[in-house]
Each structure stands twice: as structure tokens, then as C-alpha cells.
Image (cartoon, helix red, strand yellow):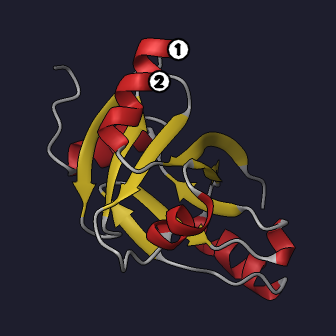
Amino acid sequence: MKGKLIRVCVVANDAAETMRDFNDLFGVEFYGPFDDEHVKLKVALPRSGGMEVSSPTAADDPIGFSQYLAANGEGIKGIALRVDNIQEAMDELKAKGVELGVYFEHNLMKECIIPPQPKTHNIEVALNEFPDEDPVGQAVARDMGIDLYA
């Protein structure tokens, strides 16, 4: 498996406010934020800047953002790596003793969240597979009904 870093995930109390702040301060542009019911998060994806901002919409979100915020406050939660074949990557990592977490799909994008653990140096890692013509932010944004050209 060979992964390519595609984005950094920031957990925030309010995704919309964080999105506005990073746009005002640094010019980072986002799609969203939108409600991702799969994982009970409000998510703003990078239009530019390689930064995703997420905030929990429920205390029982399956990725654990609510618990992370309560314990640590806002900040960088993890990274996302693009892989050519997510199933092969998941099989390889599982064979190496890595605990896999939540798996879901948006349009043509597939994602597996690997929870922080000693094997990942306690960094949450999202594996993403998507075709070149359908970058992850666009795939999820389209799936959520966002007009990419607005």
C-alpha cells in the first residue's frame, strides 16, 4: 500500500464558525458545511487548502469527535491518505495488526476511519479511495446536494 496525504482533519465546536474564521484569516475555501448523517457530523470540506473541519451533531457520533472535544478541545484530529484500492489497503493494515474503524461511501468516494492507536502513533487516519476526476471534497459535496459551481 502507498498512501498520499490529501487533507488534515480539524475537530471544532462549530464547523461553520471555524470555516469562516479560516477563510477570513487565511483564505482557505470550503464546501459546506453540511450534515453527514453517516457519521453524525457537520463537515466542511476543502475547496482549497487541504483542511477539513468537522463538528459533532450528536454525542454518540461513531468516530468519537464528541468525546475528543470533551477531552482535548478543538484542534487537529487526524489525517487523510488517498489509496488506490481501499479494500487491499484495509486487508494489508488488518494483517499488520491495525484496528480498522468506521467504513462508508459517498458517491464514488470510499472511506475507512482508523482510530488512533499505538500502531498509528495515536493519530487518526482516514483512508480514501476515489477516481482522479472525482476528488474527495467534490464527491462528498455532490452526495450532500451541494452545487459545486455556486
Image height of 7 relative to 46, above or below: below
Q: x and y percent of residue 31 in the render?
A: 31, 33
Q: Residue at x 49, y 14 (%)?
A: 25
Tag 1 and tag 2, C-beta contact below 8 Å: yes
- Can you identify the residue that label 2 sits on? 22
Side of 18 where 84 appears, left or right: right
| Quadrant of the rendered image containing residue 5 | top right
Q: Residue at x 34, y 37 (%)?
A: 138
Q: Residue at x 60, y 68 (%)?
A: 71
Quadrant where the C terminus sits is top left
- Can you identify the residue that label 1 sits on? 26
Could one spot residue 127 in this view of the protein? yes
Between 100 and 133, the residue placed more toward the observer is: 100
Amino acid type at circle 1 is Phe
* Mark 1 and mark 2: Cα distance apart in space: 5 Å
Between 144 and 55, the residue placed more toward the observer is: 55
SS type, badge 1: helix
| Quadrant of the rendered image containing residue 35 | bottom left
SS type, badge 2: helix
Quadrant where the N terminus sits is bottom right
Could one spot residue 134 in this view of the protein? no
Q: x and y percent of residue 114 in the render?
A: 63, 72
Image height of 63 relative to 43, above or below: below
Between 25 and 30, the residue placed more toward the observer is: 25
Q: Residue at x 31, y 68 (%)?
A: 40
Density class for disc 1 (Cα within 10 Å; few <14, some 14-19, many ≥20) is few
Q: x and y percent of residue 146 in the render?
A: 17, 38
Density class for disc 2 (Cα within 10 Å; few <14, some 14-19, many ≥20) is some
Q: x and y percent of residue 61 in the render?
A: 38, 74
